[in-house]
Image (cartoon, rainbow, N blue to C red):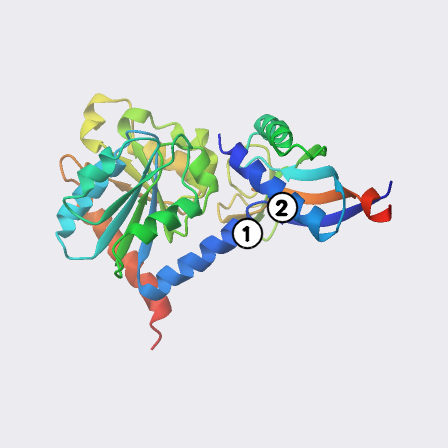
Amino acid sequence: MHEMSLVRSLMSQVQAIVTDNQAESADEILVEIGPLSGVEIELVKIAFVQWVSELGSMNARLTVHEVPLVVRCRDCNCESELNDFVFRCRECSSGRVQVVRGDDFRLVSVTLNESQSHV
Amino acid sequence: MSNKTIDVNRDIQAERREAAARLREHFTQQGTLVVNLVSSPGAGKTSLLEATCRHWCDQWKVAVLVGDLATDRDAERLRPYVPVEQLTTGGACHLELSLVERGLAKLPNERFDFLFIENIGNLVCPASHDLAEHLRVVLLSTTEGDDKPGKYPKMFRTSDVMLVTKTDLLPYVPFTVDRVTKDARLIRDDITVLEVSSLKNEGIDTWCRLLESKRTELLSKVVRP
């Protein structure tokens, strides 16, 4: 289970954003996970809860958006959404396709609680 | 209380990927082809490296970083042939770049023609971690079944070469190289497929020639006319 390691990396990136913006904490962390990201959403949520309790101060919510797997054909340039892991263009059936979405675990945005800086 | 939303829109591993790309460029400049060997446990990664070292017989300067959860049994097997460092993860299911960098620091301070990274036996997690390799090679042994590529799409999608290992057992198992090749090419249509039996030393010459030609290809990018 490498989700622990990836969520640890996510948390340190969020912490850096909190510090850089002189905010008190992060309220909401929005992430995107695709079918070819290599991570299991349920395990990401479990890892998140564990890291939050380990880090103590953080009381952020994690929101996960599932995104589809999308490929672009190098032959006809058409984009196809794949429902399985058969990497073929839906228009021309070419196998020369490039993944354009759905192969990573992405930090989309962080909503900060800035109350401290306004005290 | 006031809130502000910061847009990031960045792959969580972006920083690690950039670090891997920098290290890969360093190896490219040195003329070292880095090969990341991935497979399930027992597919024959260490046996392949033994057969590769025997075949080359000091023709090339080779080093190996070998990952395991525990013990240095694999390193012991390879030590008679080449400089080798064992990376013990203590339970982690994959190698990360930081561990590879630590292993590199312990290898003799020389320039190598080939550096092999033998990953942890696991067809899932290692697929998500760039270890600065030029070539990712997935080994699939004939006893594992020819239906595996479709079951582990990320691993086969991110591998450049699929090595079908233990081909000496083909007469005894329900496995066909044709079927596994078709399955793998639904996931990556340009994956190179080779067959080897490290035990019988079959296909090792073709495998070594592939590595040599990949290294020449790599060097042609560095040495410009």
B150 up-or-down from B213: above or below: above
The image quadrant of residue B125 is: top left
Horizontal and vertical percent for residue B162?
Answer: 34, 41
Can residue A38 be seen by looking at this rendering? no
In the visual, does B116 lie left or right of B25?
left
- Which residue position holds label 1? B15
Under mark 2, the amino acid is Gln
What mark, if any, has residue B208 been given in the picture?
none
Q: Chain of mark 2?
A: A
- CB-based contact (under 8 Å), mark 1 and mark 2: yes
Can residue B37 be seen by looking at this rendering? yes
Residue at 33%, 77% in the rendered image: B225
B180 up-or-down from B111: above or below: above
Under mark 1, the amino acid is Glu
In the visual, does B45 lie left or right of B99?
left
Assign a secondary structure to mark 2: helix
